[in-house]
Image (cartoon, rainbow, N blue to C red):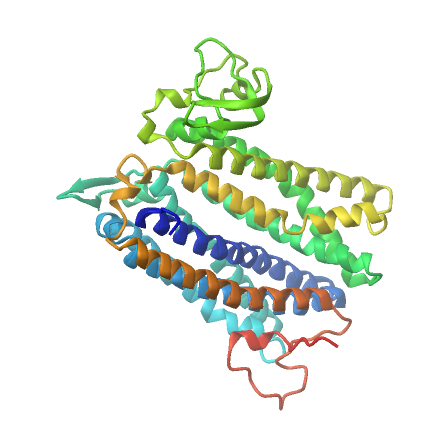
């Protein structure tokens, strides 16, 4: 296909499936905690607005959770089908970490999910709130194990190579590898921020449509408080994460910054825009700020870090993709900070729920958190290349022995199936959002009374939304 090798197609296939999958867990993590906060506020203040919002967003959570589970299963199988040599080499570490995720997180979520979605009028309020909190905790524990596995692939420690395979010798070092704290906090914070932007966009959209009511106002208000608190925090976490990456993956940093040669003793400029030309080993058409890259990455105006030419060509990541993905992530992050402060200023002036330009901006920023997550994921994973386990195993040595034709056919099937299945699911979820929260909104499983049939599947927690 288009002159691509089986390795290229395997990488594209995994990148395609994970791009779909990562969006749903991010929203699941954020919405689960949001629901726990809403139910806690309802139990504390008995404000029906919080109850209505809980039931409204629990329907969207159910659809999103289902799509996240389905998309995740496909990825798990790909480790065995497309990356069998990686599984044979590193399975003694990645396998147990993923098993721990299932044992400690997925079972926790699954065990309490039914109570959370269908038990509002069937169990006591304390037990129901506990179930919601356990689902939220399960999403965070799940993220912990997944990020531990991925972080070990980025900064592997606590292992030995015996007879050509990885053998864990120190599980604490494996789990708490050098990049793990930064990746975990960066990803969880991104999930909270993405969800806040999604919820805020929904509130702004309804206000723009004239659907101004207390539920929509609380929805927008809570979201903007979250953006104001979390967006600047994410900038600080990103700074620490960048310093950690410079220490352990300097080639990735050089690609992110687009620098080919850096002279010791001279400050390194921050390239705002440009076009990395890998053949000529130069970044063309630069717009740069002197010394700012040194200040950000070394906290010194004349700090030095290696350029791309200090690494062998076969050890460099694809520069252009990493360079631009990083700028998309940072650019959107700065816009998020701007949205948070703009909302705070309008709140102070008593105009948070008015002003079409502000509401349009908040609405437009709805998908920005998810786009930033994808851009950050591309930066991290493509920037790790050509290694699947950094400095230990190359990606070319990890791929299964499939033909390019086989990979082309399966990739085409994945593209069609994913667009169809998740396109329908996403459209349905957005229709739920467009419907908006209603006064007195109750658990769809129980609002018809005690005689209502019990739902038999998770998606039945979401009502039938038809166009009228």
Residue closer to the observer: 206 or 218: 206
The residue positioned 55% from the left and 74% from the top of the image is 459
Q: Position of residue 120 (x, y in %)?
A: 62, 75
Q: Quadrant of residue 271?
A: top right
Taking the image as shown, residue 318 lies to the left or right of residue 267, namely left
Taking the image as shown, residue 330 lies to the left or right of residue 168, namely right
Q: Is residue 253 visible?
A: yes
Q: Position of residue 129 (x, y in %)?
A: 59, 67
Residue closer to the observer: 93 or 389: 389
Residue closer to the observer: 326 or 163: 326
Q: Position of residue 16 (x, y in %)?
A: 45, 53
Q: Position of residue 285 (x, y in %)?
A: 57, 23
The residue positioned 16% from the left and 43% from the top of the image is 164
> Farthest top residue?
265
Q: Is residue 218 above or below residue 182?
A: below
Taking the image as shown, residue 188 lies to the left or right of residue 226, namely left
The residue positioned 45% from the left and 29% from the top of the image is 255
Q: Is residue 30 above or below residue 298?
A: below
Quadrant including the C terminus: bottom right
> Farthest left residue?
163
> Farthest front residue?
2
Q: Is residue 47 visible?
A: no
Residue closer to the observer: 380 or 423: 423
Taking the image as shown, residue 209 lies to the left or right of residue 339, namely right
Q: Is residue 410 above or below residue 389?
A: below
């Amino acid at each position: 296909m288009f002159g691509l090798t089986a390795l290229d197609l395997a990488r594209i296939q995994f990148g395609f499936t994970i791009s779909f999958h990562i969006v749903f867990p991010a929203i699941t993590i954020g919405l689960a905690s949001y629901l726990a906060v809403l139910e806690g506020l309802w139990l504390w203040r008995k404000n029906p607005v919080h109850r209505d919002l809980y039931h409204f967003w629990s329907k969207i959570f159910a659809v999103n959770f289902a799509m996240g589970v389905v998309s995740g299963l496909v990825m798990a199988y790909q480790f065995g089908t497309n990356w069998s040599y990686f599984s044979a080499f590193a399975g003694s570490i990645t396998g147990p970490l993923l098993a721990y995720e299932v044992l400690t997180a997925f079972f926790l979520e699954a065990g309490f999910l039914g109570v959370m979605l269908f038990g509002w009028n069937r169990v006591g309020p304390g037990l129901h709130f506990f179930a919601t909190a356990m689902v939220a905790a399960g999403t965070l524990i799940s993220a912990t194990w997944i990020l531990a596995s991925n972080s070990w692939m980025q900064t592997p420690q606590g292992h030995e190579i015996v007879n050509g395979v990885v053998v864990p010798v120190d599980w604490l070092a494996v789990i708490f590898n050098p990049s793990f704290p930064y990746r975990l906090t960066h990803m969880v914070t991104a999930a909270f921020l993405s969800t806040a932007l999604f919820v805020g966009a929904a509130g702004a959209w309804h206000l723009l449509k004239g659907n101004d009511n207390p539920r929509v106002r609380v929805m927008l208000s809570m979201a903007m408080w979250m953006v104001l608190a979390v967006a600047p925090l994410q900038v600080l976490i990103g700074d620490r994460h960048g310093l950690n990456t410079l220490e352990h993956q300097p080639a990735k940093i050089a690609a992110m910054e687009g620098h080919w040669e850096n002279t010791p003793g001279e400050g390194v400029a921050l390239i705002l825009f440009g076009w990395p030309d890998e053949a000529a080993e130069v970044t063309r058409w630069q717009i740069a700020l002197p010394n700012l890259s040194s200040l950000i990455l070394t906290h010194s105006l004349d700090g030095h870090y290696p350029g791309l030419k200090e690494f062998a060509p076969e050890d460099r990541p694809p520069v252009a993709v990493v360079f631009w993905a990083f700028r998309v992530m940072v650019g959107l992050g700065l816009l998020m900070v701007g949205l948070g402060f703009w909302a705070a200023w309008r709140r102070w002036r008593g105009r948070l729920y008015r002003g079409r330009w502000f509401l349009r901006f908040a609405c437009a920023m709805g998908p920005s958190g998810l786009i930033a997550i994808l851009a950050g994921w591309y930066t991290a994973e493509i920037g790790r290349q050509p290694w699947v386990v950094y400095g230990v195993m190359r990606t070319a040595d990890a791929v299964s022995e499939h033909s390019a034709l086989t990979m082309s056919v399966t990739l085409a099937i994945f593209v069609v199936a994913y667009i169809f299945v998740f396109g329908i699911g996403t459209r349905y979820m957005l229709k739920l959002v467009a419907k908006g929260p209603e006064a007195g909104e109750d658990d769809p499983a129980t609002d018809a009374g005690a005689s209502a049939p019990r739902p038999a599947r998770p998606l039945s927690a979401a009502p039938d939304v038809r166009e009228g």
